[in-house]
Amino acid sequence: MQALTCALLVAAANGFYSPQQKAKVAPRALARAAKEGQAAAGEKQRIVVVGNGMVGQRLVELCADKLAERGASDDVDIVSFCEERLAAYNRVRLTSWFETRDADDLSLVGSYKDAPQGEWYASEERPNCKVRVGDLATGLDVDKKTVACGDELVSYDKCVLATGSYPFVPPIPGKDLPGVFVYRTIDDLEALVAYQKAHGVKSAAVIGGGLLGLEAAKAMHDLGMKTHILEYAPILMCRQIDQGGHDALVGMVEDLGLEVHCDARTKAFEADADGRVSRVTFETEGWDDLDVGIVVVSAGIRPRDEVARDAVECHERGGVVVSDTLQTSDKDVYAVGEVALHGGMIYGLVAPGYAMAEVAADHLVADLLGEEASSTFEGADLSTKLKLLGCDVANFGEASGDEALVWEDKLSRTYRKLFFSKTDEGWVLAGGILVGDADDYAELLALSKSGSVVEEPASLLTPLKMRGAGALEVDDSDPAKQICSCNAVSRGDLETFIQATGEETTYAEIKKCTKAGSGCGGCEPDVKKILKVELEKMGATVNNNLCAHFDYSRPELVAKIRLDEQNFKSFDEVLAAHGHGDGCEICKPAVASILASLHNEKVLEGDRAALQDTNDRSLANMQRGGSYSVVPRVPGGEILPEQLIVLGEVAKKYDLYSKITGAQRVDLFGAAKADLPSIWADLGKVGFESGHAYGKALRTVKSCVGSSWCRYGVQNSVDFAITVENRYKGLRSPHKMKSAVSGCTRECAEAQCKDFGMIATEHGYDLYVAGNGGMNPRHGALLASGIDEATTLKYIDRFLMYYILTAERLERTAPWFERLASTDEARLKALQDVIIDDSLGICDELDKRMEHHLATYHDEWAEVVKNPDKFAHLFKQFANTDEVQPADEMIEFVETRGQRRPVDWPADGEAQTNWRPPSLSVFERSEHSWQDFGPADAFQPNLGTAVLYGKTQLAVFKLKDGSVFATQNMCPHKQAFVLAQGIASDGEVPKVACPLHKKQFDLSSGKEINGGDLEIVTFEAKVQDGRMMLHLPPRDEVDAVLATDKLRVCSEAPVEEPVFSR
């Protein structure tokens, strides 16, 4: 089967473009020798590597290591030419640059902060290794053994061509217009982003539906552009998948909001009046033109062999011909990666390129040192597993056989096709295509390579998470099992390294030394899992403590609180008995959740409000711009007409955006925090209660109509769903929980992918547990079948309480279940033993804890409505005034299909993100005065409070030790006015964690901590005579920097104005 080839995975030549796209490198003063003769006897020898991409850099590292092993580093210099302005970086993960826009995150040579060659080349440990950044090799003379760089000639003893490939741009009229880009280097991405920003581009087209094209399309979409994918072939990724795989992939791509056009015959790129690209036209009959402001061409790659054409044998269609030792027609010149044509084939994957580098390094070092080398390159396994737009896409083995079996699930966008060959002994797995679910890729690949007979071929077809006992058994302990396919690192390799390195081994060390995880990154979870297992074998302490303030995991802490005779009910009591310090944004909500699960007391009463995460503290979900969403409970999805009417009236009254959720409820967006109690009061008049959409608790119990309406229904699923939801509503847990009840085996409520779900049969209900949708879908395990409603509820009671008492922080039921044992069969048996057979003798306690929950249930919204004086301070926008700043003064709202919503956040690095003050000392020369902001008692300990000063929102934090801090209320990351809603704590430094993305800031200095470089403005604060006092510059000066209307996020970034003058 052809590989999952695509330009994103090309490793070889990162440093190079096509001859037509040579970098505009400033001429260098030719200070080096105009010509250097070949090394004479006794002089240093030299390896010259032309190209410093992923494979070129790997070859340099391998040569350096092999020379060091032989004590010959001082005898051989290694010089690498890199045409780009930065030395080697991970082109496989190029799209991840958009996440941070920091080239260091892609670097293969350490940080570029001090020098463009990176830390690896700058290190004194490797004085014989040099990279010439920004230097383009322009010629090769094998007779004189020199590489030309402009007018300069550099001699070599051995030369390696690692020039890779260049992006192919079809001869489409308009291909040279401004706004037409390729997607190959960091410079390409930076230019594209700058162009979009400069011209306000709102739509883009990507030419090519291969992997790189799809990655580019997703990047364009994430930049806020309406994006079209134009593919010449009838299907996407036509070299890797078939029509069924295409259908599944297109579904996922379109779910993300991108548009796919296959069989596209592009005619031209046309310009607007300003000469920039503005339209794509087609030869395809009946196709309309596409109005776009950017075109990204990703139409394949071509070998970059122009340096070699006049020097060594090259194929007429491209590529330097090499032998099994990677030597060209000249014995002192080698070629590796995408420029190398081996056996009539160009390899476009990183793993074969690395394998070539290993063989070439063996031979050229051995030859230089007068040794023999026997390794050969005999081709490579082109099986590949990729993560594409969050979706698994994989192939392995041969795409042919005597029989093919297909699994196609259009609901979950899953497609699997396995090919089997018939032998005298039976059926063997020949190969396969996996789209949407490739969890068993490594096992299927190993099975296809082994040639073992498969007794039940159909058992392999079902996705791994849906299989029961009898399916493919996987030996996770097999040392030969490949973990990192990019770098051919096996489990045994990792185990050996960890055992040799010892108890202090870290993932970063593994990545650096074994290269596992340094390619596409898909193996990172497996590598970390192996690290944990090996450290435990050594007796090393694997730290899973809750945080720095508790030396226990969540289950351990729950056990201590459960068994404590003092019956602790407050965070301070738990901290004093089992922790240390003041607590933090991790342990405070975690302990608050534990106490709520065990005692079910009101979460906002007393000092418990300061422990809650932002959403729990507000009993609503914070959304973009700092507004909130309201989701009332609709048990079982059943709703009365008068309730629907009130929902509409409330939405109109408060100008809320309305949307039906995926769980049979109505979500009202855009509520101001100060309006929440009034909204809850209006909804409560017709029986609505809190839906706990904001909490780690039961969200909803979905249902079909069952036997009450459906002709197929065998049980009344609506009645039972309402019973179940009302039973477990308000139950706090380590993570959110969802449930469903289906009235028959047609499974319309999708109960098998829920934390617990019931499917009706003629004999009762089948109870499934530990299922999960979302990012990592998991089929539920059948805990019991054919049971009545009472038994079902008893088992659910115990299952939920057992989960609550033993799960880790923020661990859903699916991963919790997977930790119970090594196989699904063993996990299910362990759970049945506890819940049904009471093997641990704790069922009585589990039953009583659920009875306590049922007896103490209270509607959290109703408590606020009934006690306005007790909770009013939590919902007032500013402590010092009744004045309000509406949500649309903090972020622009736009109309969408008749409703209002906030404008899209710009991508990180764009204008209106990562805001910075002119300097942290911007007010240093201002004349400050102490301003009174009201009674100090109005500012709760460890709870941020917003105040208004002129047009500026400030956040005041009074910590447990009595210290007081004041800062801007706007988090600079997304310019959202939310810092006062974050959790504040002291410790090594007093800090606040932004509630949106958990960025943390030092309340004293204003600097971001934990590695970030953002800053917030801080002010001196104190409590004097019972009053909260802030030391502030004049209002107009503060407003000039921090006024809400000045920092409001808009669809068009405001023009920067001078701050203020004195």
Image (cartoon, grey):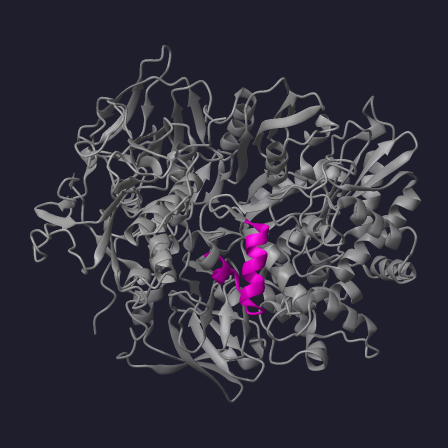
Return the x and y of residue 767 as percentages of the image width and height: 83, 41
- In the figure, is residue 974 to the left or right of 680? left
Q: Residue furthest top?
A: 285
Q: Residue at x 29, y 44 (%)?
A: 197
Q: Main secondary structure of the magenta part?
A: helix
Q: Quadrant of residue 221?
A: top left
Tell me: residue 556, above or below residue 658: below
Return the x and y of residue 905 as percentages of the image width and height: 42, 48
Q: In this view of the protein, which residue sits in the foreground, 316 or 521?
A: 316
Q: Quadrant of residue 1045?
A: bottom left
Tell me: residue 244, above or below residue 786: above
Q: Residue furthest bottom?
A: 1025
Residue 998 in sight from this viewpoint: yes
Q: Quadrant of residue 76?
A: bottom left
Q: From which residue to which does the magenta span run?
A: 490-511
Residue 674 in sight from this viewpoint: no
Q: In this view of the protein, which residue sits in the foreground, 903 or 952?
A: 903
Q: Residue at x 49, y 51 (%)?
A: 517
Q: In this view of the protein, which residue sits in the foreground, 630 or 37?
A: 37
In reply to whether residue 499 is colored magenta, the answer given is yes
Q: In this view of the protein, which residue sits in the foreground, 502 or 389?
A: 502
Return the x and y of residue 680 as percentages of the image width and height: 66, 53
In reply to whether residue 750 is colored magenta, the answer given is no
- In the figure, is residue 824 to the left or right of 63? right
Query: Quadrant of the image for the C terminus?
Result: bottom left
- In the figure, is residue 315 to the left or right of 875? left
Return the x and y of residue 348 as percentages of the image width and height: 39, 34
Q: How many marks?
A: 0
